[in-house]
Amino acid sequence: MVIYEEVKEFLKKVPPFQFLEEETLYSIIPYLQLDFYPKDTVILKEGGESSNFLYLIKKGAVKITLEGEKGEEILVDIRGEGETFGLWSLLEGRQQTTIRALEDTLCYLLPKEKVLELLDQKGLFSEFFLKKHISKYLDRLVKERLPRKGLDTGFERAFYSTRIEDIASRKVFTVPAEATIQEAAALMAQERIGSLIVTEGERPVGIVTDRDLREKVVASGRLISEPVKSIMNAPLITIEADHLVFEAVALMVKNRIHHLPVVKDGRLCGMLTNHDLLLLQGISPLTIAQEIQKQDTIEGLSKIPSKIISFLGLLLKEDVPIPSLLHVIVEMNDSIVARILDLVLKDLGPPPVPFCWIAYGSEGRREQTFTTDQDNGLVYQDPATPEETVTCENYFRTLAKKTVEALVQCGFARCPGNYMASNPRWCQPLKVWKDYFRRWINTPTPEAILQSVILFDFRGLYGEISLAQELKDFLLKEVRGKDIFLLHMAKLTVQFKPPLGFFRTFVVEKSGEHKDELNLKYRGLAPIVNIARLWALETPIAETSTLERLERLKEIHPLAKEYGPELMEAFEFLMSLRLHHQYEQVQRGEKPDNYINPKHLTQLERKFFKEVCSLISKVQDRIENKYMLGRLG
């Protein structure tokens, strides 16, 4: 009877068994089997035999995955102690996922016939599974795998599950590049369409829209006998038909376009327009972006971030993949920055030389969340004369100051370290930026390393993007073979340890405002960001996003090949915790931060967090050994 009592006490602590009457609970114990699965054991395989048991995890954890269209592994869920799996397979008679032991795992197995008996009782046991467990699982399955045909599941889901070819207009009208503007306009009027693809032979080279006819022909008095290629927009931005709607919207927002040609196997097969997107209904990043473009004042723009936060909340509730969510955040924020610069430039007049507004830090890495400080700079073309140098300094410092102030009005806090374009140090011509980078790499003082960590994660955001690209090319060339610099970057990479103590307990603040909490950004995400940056500079590669870096590096960098996929999964997990935490704070009217109390996480979240910490420590140890960091003291 000792074993009976032990099993009963365990079952009484976990749902849905805790809802059973004691007599019923005792009656199923003789049918339970206890099985052990070593780490990495495939317990149930996608497409294999269906389950004949309901599995209840006594100790350990499993991960549930799907195979993607390109053979990639899609993580559906992770389950730990006290959680179950195998029910859907048992009921449906087919196995749609692979379930693998994440670590040594011990499970109780309840045979199918006993499970069906319990479900037939129509009590809390069956209600738990049929209304919560299966619905949650099917929700994930629909998002990741089921055919994406219907648009009746709500905008938030359709936005991330609908293929472009399912909603794009099928017929595409074209016009030869040498045709006249009048001929193009006549065709658009005849077919009642808002755009035409311009072709040279069979090759699409540009697009002309009704807006081009208004602004480039009617408003400017251009001759309608000129060739249509003289007013077309080129190069042509296109998207593959099998991509998802959110990717198209992000592309349209980024490029401020309202017509997007769709291609399949290199051939034009459709056109995506605002009208097509309206079929999805509801709020969308595109409608928010259009609202941003309509604003003529900073005050008007300052009201937009609250709408973005509401939309992001919807996406969080829909369990939208973290990379997609970050993509939406950055495109919306970039649109606000771009519109502010539009308005400031309108007020100041045209710049004396081309310039590029650059973003770095988390903004440069496209990893902003609900709270973000400004991390920006300005690079402009090298002036040709001393007089032009003075003119450029006065103009661009005024531009930077006004832009930073407007960003503050729109909710983008000032950077505590003053890494902003309004600081004259970060508003400089290209040659000065190159001098900065060269000096930091060749003389890696502690200050130089700190500045490198922040500013090397940069990207061009607005203006003459080729200036940012030239600076990026310079950086990648300059860093090659600079072992001493990389040595100091490696030291910083292993300096920030994950918050896990010797006895696998979380290391938290002992006193102060955040007592019993830990900083998820600096103790969890930052070590992964630093690892990816170090490897990116070692290689070197141009990507700045942590996930993009790891995705690229896992094919070409020795340590990234070994640990890259796990680090990507860890990064997404920690970012998910951070985003949900901050959104809950926003909902309560609190200022979002990065501090969490581990005790407030679920048992499974705590367990996975500890595994992430162990992974980071393991990678840091490998880096420390590679660089023999003991010699730096």
Image: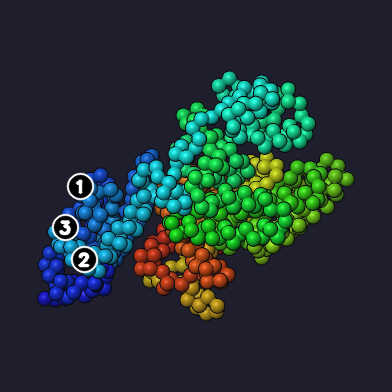
Q: Is residue 111 left or right of residue 221?
A: left
Q: Which x, y percent locates residue 192?
A: 59, 32
Report the disc number at residue 49: 1
Say which amino acid is labelled 3.
Answer: Lys
Q: Nearer the viewer, residue 34 or 124?
A: 124
Q: Tag 1's secondary structure?
A: loop
Contact check, label 1 and label 3, Cβ < 8 Å = no
Between marks 2 and 3, how big is the CA–CA gap?
16 Å
Nearer to us: label 1 or label 2: 2
In the image, residue 187 sits, relative to residue 82, either above or below, namely: above
Mark 1 crowd level (few <14, some 14–19, many ≥20, 10 Å Cα)? some
Mark 2 crowd level (few <14, some 14–19, many ≥20, 10 Å Cα)? few
Pointer 2: what residue?
122
Q: Which x, y percent locates residue 47?
A: 25, 44
Q: Earlier in the sequence, mark 1 or mark 2?
A: 1
Q: Earlier in the sequence, mark 2 or mark 3?
A: 3
Q: Residue at x 44, y 48 (%)?
A: 158
Q: Residue at x 58, y 29 (%)?
A: 191
Mark 3 crowd level (few <14, some 14–19, many ≥20, 10 Å Cα)? some
Pointer 3: what residue?
112
Q: Quadrant of the N terminus?
A: bottom left
Q: Is residue 386 left or right of residue 512?
A: right
Say which amino acid is labelled 2.
Answer: Lys
Q: Nearer the viewer, residue 319 or 486?
A: 319
In the image, residue 22 sits, relative to residue 578, either above or below, namely: below
Q: Residue at x 12, y 64 (%)?
A: 31
Q: Earlier in the sequence, mark 1 or mark 3?
A: 1
Q: Is residue 36 left or right of residue 522?
A: left
In the image, residue 322 sits, relative to residue 150, either above or below, namely: below
Contact check, label 2 and label 3, Cβ < 8 Å = no
Q: Which x, y percent locates residue 423?
A: 74, 58
